[in-house]
């Protein structure tokens, strides 16, 4: 359970989406806890551990101590960890991946004339609306994306709970792009909970009713909203693939944090170990 002072610590130092407690809580159903400077979530036999410290430099040994404390406290069946470094040599690993978070520094942000022209052309074809509601049209657009892409079970699960996240949050913003007929053709979701960061959480675009430049137009609205709210950075999310990396670099994003993910199943303790721990 997060106390008021701890909530301030999280908000003042959050730099990755996993630090947004309403987001991870809504997706996982987990309850947030702090172990030192490290945030984690416990739910249904799973520990989600965020290895990006709040308010101090990353130290792998310190992170491992906090992970050990959290594991001993919650006794999960499996552990999901995201961190700059995950040094695991464990036969019980179920999934593993690596990437980088990309960041846009708003103090140095300058939109290029070429990108501005792309946005101007797109703006002739679309209208943009900002809302705190996630409606059936958003759900349908996500379904269109899932049906036309190879999506992992974990990613699909996250997508299915976006509505729960938006409904639970008072800092999430849905930015919709509609065509001339009023049909939803694309949308972004941003989050402004952190003190210094805005987060580029999701972007979905229709292939069937695609308008060139619509993603640029939506991101530009997100950036302007972040500037109005006094944010210093936009966390643009992970690289994922070459096309997405190109898009983020074009906007001035740079890789700023390594990302490693691992999901592993904990070895079951024998009876003697369980008895000794209780002594």
Image (cartoon, grey):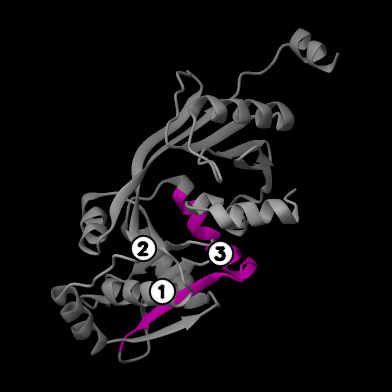
Identify the mark at residue 227; answer none if there is no mark: 1
Q: CA distance from mark 3 to mark 1?
A: 14 Å
What is the span of residues highlighted in magenta in the rendered image?
155-179
Q: CA distance from mark 3 to mark 2?
A: 27 Å
Q: Residue at x 28, y 67 (%)?
A: 109
Please tell me whether mark 3 or mark 2 is closer to you in this view.
Answer: 3
Mark before the other along the chain sequence, 3 or 1: 3
Tell me residue 182's x, y (percent): 37, 89
Graded by Cα atoms within 10 Å as few (under 14), some (14 to 19) or many (20 or more), the crowding at tag 1 reads some
Image vertical order of residue 215 relative to residue 146, above or below: below
Graded by Cα atoms within 10 Å as few (under 14), some (14 to 19) or many (20 or more), the crowding at tag 2 reads some
Image vertical order of residue 178 relative to residue 37, above or below: below
Please tell me whether mark 2 or mark 1 is closer to you in this view.
Answer: 1
Q: Are marks 3 and 1 in contact (CB under 8 Å)?
A: no
The quadrant the C terminus occupies is: top right
Asked whether 96 or 140 is in front, the reply is 96
Q: Residue at x 57, y 68 (%)?
A: 166
Asked whether 233 or 127 is in front, the reply is 233
Residue identifier under label 2? 145
Residue identifier under label 3? 193
């Amino acid at each position: 359970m997060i106390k008021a002072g701890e909530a301030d610590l999280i908000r003042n130092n959050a730099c990755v989406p996993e630090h947004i407690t309403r987001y991870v809580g809504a997706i996982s159903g987990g309850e947030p806890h702090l172990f030192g400077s490290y945030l984690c979530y416990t739910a249904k036999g799973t520990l989600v551990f965020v290895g990006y410290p709040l308010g101090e430099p990353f130290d792998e040994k310190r992170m491992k101590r906090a992970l050990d404390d959290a594991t001993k406290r919650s006794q999960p069946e499996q552990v999901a960890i995201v961190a700059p470094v995950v040094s695991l040599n464990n036969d019980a690993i179920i999934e593993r991946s690596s990437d980088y978070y990309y960041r846009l520094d708003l103090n140095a942000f300058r939109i290029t004339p070429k990108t501005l022209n792309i946005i101007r052309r797109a703006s002739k074809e679309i209208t943009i609306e900002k809302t705190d509601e996630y409606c059936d049209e958003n759900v349908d657009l996500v379904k269109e994306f899932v049906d036309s892409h190879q999506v992992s079970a974990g990613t699909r699960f996250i997508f299915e709970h976006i509505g729960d996240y938006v409904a639970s949050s008072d800092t999430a913003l849905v930015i919709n792009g509609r065509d001339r007929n009023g049909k939803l053709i694309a949308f972004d979701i941003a989050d402004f909970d952190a003190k210094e960061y805005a987060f580029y959480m999701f972007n979905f675009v229709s292939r069937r009713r695609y308008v060139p430049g619509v993603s640029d137009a939506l991101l530009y609205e997100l950036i302007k909203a972040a500037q109005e709210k006094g944010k210093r950075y936009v966390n643009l999310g992970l690289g994922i693939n070459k096309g997405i990396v190109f898009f983020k670099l074009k906007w001035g994003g740079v890789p700023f944090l390594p990302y490693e993910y691992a999901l592993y199943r904990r070895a079951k303790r024998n009876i003697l170990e369980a008895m000794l721990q209780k002594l």
